[in-house]
Amino acid sequence: MPVKSGASGGILPSGSGLSAISPLYCTPPLLRSLIACALVASSLTLPTAAQAGHLLVLNSEGDTLSVVDVDKKVELRRIRVGGGPHHLMALPDDSALVVGLTSVNKLAFLDRKTGEVTKTVSMLDPYQMAFSPDRKTFVATALRMNYVDIYAGDLSSPNKPLARVKTGDMPSHLVFSPDSKFVYVTEQGRDSVVRIDVAAGKVVGRVAVGDAPAGIWLTPDGKTLLVGIMGENFVSVIDRESFKVTGKIITGKGAHNFLPMGDKRRLLVSNRAEDTISIIDMTTLKVLETFKAPGNPDCMELTRDGKTLWYTARIGKKVMAIDMATKAVVASVPVGRSPHGLYFFDHAPRE
């Protein structure tokens, strides 16, 4: 580390913020040297990029990943990850991140500290993906190919699915049942949701929900599925046991994707066509609040303390931040083309 001389002839780590008239330079030479060494050692253990609160943003049309410093509110660097990145998630043990590269039919593994690609494996059009609650199964939707692929949860042979399930047009988002036996997938091109028996590897139910369903979420009690109806202005409500639509929640035009707020009660939904975000109470199935979110809001991440909501603004080529106390936009950071999925290391609980 660069050092500079102090007025008293001692050494001081560059950038330490201590001046030549610091009390450090009023200490005996030996003690002064020990303190200086301690300062250098402590500077070498500064938080990594992951620990320092960096946001990772996938730019779907730029084939890149942006690393954003959420404190300074700037893009630090842009990393090439491969063709067609849309969504990313952490492995169950949090050892790495995985990104679906749809246009090159690969799953990329990223170093969770740097965002750099460490390896890729073959996988057909992995658009959206999830691990089952019991971690025994990994499922990926192939939106362009109209398949849902079921893999072993350890991804030991990711290029060889245990089952390939033919679906309706444009299988998009997915969620598992609490017991891991079923996976529910939205079909954007067929305006429906399918229920897939994971062990049997086949569709065992389908229900119409509305124009262009996208995001899907399961309430904490495991009883209700919520589906963002992107072509309309509501969230469709499905009773999971009977697999029937039981109602709708009016949120805003282009209801799209979900993010829980970490308290097992409140759920965020992005209304893309209306440039708003709504908060749904998952116990009453009522809208608590709707606030402005300019730029075509899509995927979202909430800081662990619940104070700041980050989201991708698809048409604005930006990632935005909202102060959850005032609902005011507090950051607008330019990134790559068509920013989509994002991941914040210090995020709120997914419940």
Image: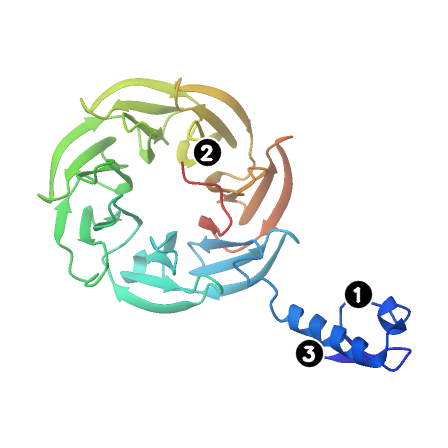
Q: CA distance from mark 3 to mark 2?
A: 46 Å
SS of the residue under disc 1: loop
**What's the residue type where badge 2 is placed?**
Ser
Give the number of the mark in front: 2 or 1: 1
SS of the residue under disc 3: loop
User: Which part of the image, by quadrant, shows the C terminus?
Assistant: top left
Give the number of the mark in front: 3 or 2: 3
Q: Which residue bears the numbered disc 1?
A: 17
Find out whether the residues at labels 2 and 1 contact each other: C-beta distance under 8 Å. Answer: no
* Residue 210: x %, y % from top left: 29, 26
Upstream in the sequence, badge 3 or badge 2?
3
**What residue is shown at x 13% (from left), y 54% (from top)?**
162
Q: Which residue bears the numbered disc 3?
A: 1
The answer to whether residue 252 is visible is no
* Residue 221: x %, y % from top left: 31, 27
Upstream in the sequence, badge 2 or badge 1?
1
Q: CA distance from mark 2 to mark 1?
A: 43 Å
**What's the residue type where badge 3 is placed?**
Met
**Which label was assigned to residue 270?**
2
Q: Is residue 223 above or below residue 109?
A: above
Q: Is residue 349 above or below residue 343?
A: above
